[in-house]
Structure formats: structure tokens, C-alpha cells
Amino acid sequence: MNTEHAITWFVTGASRGFGNVWTRAALRRGDRVVATARDVAALKPLADEFGDAILPLTLDVTDREAAFAAVDRGAERFGGIDVVVNNAGYGLFGAVEEVTEAQARAQLETNLLGALWVTQAVLPGMRERGRGHILQVSSIGGVAAFPMLGLYNASKWGLEAFSESLAQEVAPYGIKVTIIEPGPYGTDWSGSSSVHAEPHPAYEHVREARRAAAAGREPIGPEVTAEAVLSVVDAERPPLRLFLGSYCLPIAERAYAGRLDTWREWRALSESADG
């Protein structure tokens, strides 16, 4: 391993999907990775292949104390954390009316608060060292909302909001923040790791329309995203937001155009509230 310019990553949800792809990409180019997953046994193939360059750890990101402990172990092992990838998360499918309290809380605890706890854990070390890069894995669903994904969208919109604030707070300390917004890739996000609310017949037509739209789209393997993520990590001035895939920008353009049209249409009423 070439350690002359090696950096240390801390990746949550490293056992599959984007987390696994980006962990492998970092290790293959000679970087070091603190790789975390709920089940550390799932990280054994990575440990077997890359040896001392990887520190596999068990981590449930909803446990704030455990997140701090994992970051401390990684920093102690490799001398500090340079790049954080808050990737751990899953999809919750169901209409807003269908989602249970437990499902809603679990979705926000993992996708939103899990990223918050890891972010809080790494910031003191990054501030002290005067550098660092935090990659928050959002989604096109963090920019535009889709039916049957209301609580998932909420978790990603929340992630985008606190990350935008974070970027302004930590820039004076040399810390960079990038919100990664992938389109639909062939990860396990909608597979075995996903949760589905009990369906109500009233929303079957919405579900059917969603299935029909997805049926005409061939998912792309997540492996193709590795070079883009390495490039943004290496960038001197990385963007605050980065779409992955050509699917996203047209959706964002329509969403923002629609919002601006509505705000302008109702501008007179809005301004009447000035008093």
C-alpha cells in the first residue's frame, strides 16, 4: 500500500451498496478505511482482502454513544479521520397515512439522526487538525419528494438542511461538506434492507403508478459511481451538492421551477402579510 498520500475514511453502512463500493475504491488506491456495519461479519471479505488498511467495526448509527466510540477507535488506529461517508440508511415505503409511529421514528433515527451523531463525533478531531471532508449520502429524494416515500424523503430533506447549515459553520476550520445525491442505482436500498408499511387500498392506484414508472427503468450498478466520489474527495474546492447520474438534474429543474412559479403566482398575497 502506498501510504505517502493515503487518507483515512470513516464509512457507515460499508457492507453493501454505495458504502461497500466506495470503501473498496478507497482501499484499492491505498487509502485506509474505518468500515462500519450493523453486522461486522459482513465486512469479513473486505478485511480478508485488505488486511491492516481496514478497521472493521460494528456500529448501529442510531446509538450516539457507539458512534463516538467508533470514531475514537478509528482515530486512534489511523491517527485521525480525513473523510466521513454517512451512508448508512434504508428506504421506508408507504403512504404518509400508512406509516406507523415506530416505522417513522426508526426511519428518522437511522437516516437523519444516525448521520448527525457520526458528524458530531468527527467534528472535534477535524477542527483540531484544521481539515476534513464530510460526505452526506442523500438522494434525489432529498431534493424532490415522491409518493410512497414521504418519510424517507423527510429524512433526506432533514439531512440536506442540517448539512447546509453545517457547511457554513465549519468552513472557517477547513472542513468541507458535500451532499451526495444519487439517482436510482441497483443497491439494496429498495431490496431486503427496505421496510414497507401495511398497504391501504385507498392508495393502491398510487402504488401501481409508481410500479409502472419503475418498470421502464433499468437500474445501474453502483460500481460506476466510485470514480466520481474519489474525484470529489480529491477536489480542492468540492461542491456542497453533487448529483450522481443523469437522472437527477431534470427532476431538480422541474421541482425548483414549480416552486418558483407557485411563489411568484402567490407573491401579492405573500407580500400582503407584511402588514
Image (cartoon, helix red, strand yellow):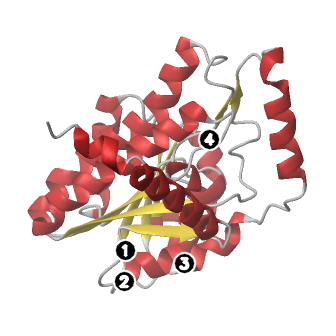
- Callout 1 amino acid: Pro
Tell me residue 232's x, y (percent). 43, 77
User: Which residue is tagged 2?
Assistant: 235
Can the viewer see residue 50 in this picture?
Answer: no
- Callout 4 amino acid: Ala
Q: Is residue 89 left or right of residue 125?
A: right
Q: Is residue 206 left or right of residue 91?
A: right
> Which mark is on residue 239?
1
Q: Nearer the viewer, mark 4 or mark 1?
A: 1
Tell me residue 2's x, y (percent). 43, 85
**Separation of residues labelled 2 and 1 (CA atoms):** 9 Å
Numbered-mark total: 4
Tell me residue 38's x, y (percent). 54, 36
Earlier-in-chain disc, 4 versus 1: 4
**Callout 4–callout 1 Cβ contact below 8 Å:** no
Label 1: which secondary element: loop
> Which mark is on residue 41?
4
Q: Nearer the viewer, residue 250 or 165?
A: 250
> Which mark is on residue 228?
3
Using a 10 Å C-alpha cutoff, classify the residue at mark 2 as few (fewer than 14 neighbours), some (14 to 19) or many (20 or more). Answer: few
**Callout 2–callout 1 Cβ contact below 8 Å:** yes
Q: Nearer the viewer, mark 2 or mark 4?
A: 2
Tell me residue 114's x, y (percent). 40, 37
